[in-house]
Image (cartoon, helix red, strand yellow):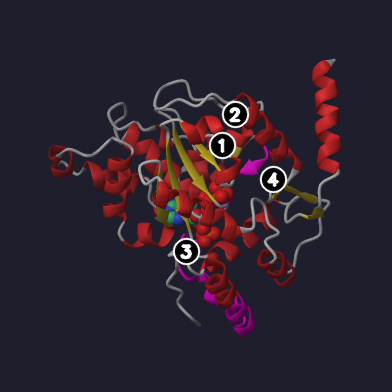
Amino acid sequence: MAEERQMKKEDELTLSLPRERGWRVPDLYLFQQFWCPSIFIKGVNILQKQFEAKDSDIIVASFPKSGTTWLKAIAFAIVNRQYFSIHNHPLLTSNPHQLVPFVELMHFPDTHFPTTEPRLFGTHIPFPSLSESITECDSKIIYICRNPFDTFISAWDYFDKIKDHSLSALTMDEAFEMYCNGIIEFGPWWSHMLGYWNESIVRPNKVLFLKYEDLKENVNFCVKRVAEFLGFPFTQEEEGNGVVESIIKLCSFEKMKGLEVNKSGMLFKVLENKHFFRKGEIGDWVNYFSPSMTEKLSKMVEEKLSGSGLSFEIMHS
Ligand code: PAP
């Protein structure tokens, strides 16, 4: 009864929030200064009230479509490398989102809560809304960020593929307008990246800030950096034996996209795993952006990130 009353109160609170049309769901609500579907409001509330973080926890954080799936796979492969051979690896039969579940989805019946330590979780929640239990303990956060141009195209394509059947498709112009106004799940994108960026400067031992582009360009260096940061550095012997390379290969776009689980498997019985793997490239946005879109987003990136020290090398069309 008390639980029902609490749920009713939360529903009423949600309905009182500013609301906009979503990309894949009818409504996005402005909750704790970020836009999100009601299902995640529930998840964030549960997280903030109930989640008990452990010092050994590892959180893979990101804005959607920034390389989450890839970094989850890499982190899982790094910390579990002593338990699995590369030929009999969970990543060959499970999608990274199954192995590294989102903390905001713990209330979903099909979420598998990690039972062994270190526990690995993912999250798209902005830094200020993470539970204090996570931010105040010694758990580690690895954040992956991607240039806002490719992120937009990836999101537009993905949300269109998974949207509610009842929802009309967003044109690219409509989606772009919303994106520039910060209206996208877990947006605005600039405050999302700056939240983690600033924290990575203040607490470099707590938050490691990575860029998708750096991973693409020097994955070997980045994998070793992540392993060190998480407290699982590669030994010289491992490096000599090609352990780093085998993890890189296992987690590569080509390998993961080609696995049966990622071609025909489903997440939560509704999301097709194949949609997490599209092109996996840097700069695909040039095939979609008009000159005016390029100009507008370039200016926005400059303005929004100005003075932060965070920047992106953007290849212009
Ligand atoms: P999510 O937020 O829904 O979890 P996320 O994994 O962050 O998505 O981003 C998906 C992007 O990462 C896709 O980019 P694209 O649309 O530009 O192609 C996807 O292809 C790319 N991606 C997925 N796995 C890998 C990988 N192993 N290596 C490189 N890129 C990858």
Residue located at (35% from left, 44% from top): 250
Give the label, 2 or 4, closer to the camera.
Answer: 4
Q: Which residues are magenta?
A: 269-296
Horizontal relation, residue 297 to residue 33: left or right? left
Q: Which residue is mark 3?
A: 308
Pointer 2: what residue?
111
- Whichever of labels 3 and 4 marks the residue nearer the N terminus, that label is 4
Real-space Cα separation, disc 1 to disc 4, in angstroms? 18 Å
Q: Is residue 282 magenta?
A: yes
Q: Identity of the amino acid at label 2?
A: Thr
Judge by depth and name the residue closer to the eye, 206 or 230: 206
What's the distance in space between the residues labelled 3 and 2, CA to CA? 36 Å
The picture places residue 289, in percent across and down from the top left corner, at 60, 77
Q: Which residue is mark 1?
A: 102
Q: Secondary structure at mark 1?
A: loop
Residue at figure coordinates x 24%, y 38% from the top left: 233
Residue 293 screen position, x and y as percent: 63, 78
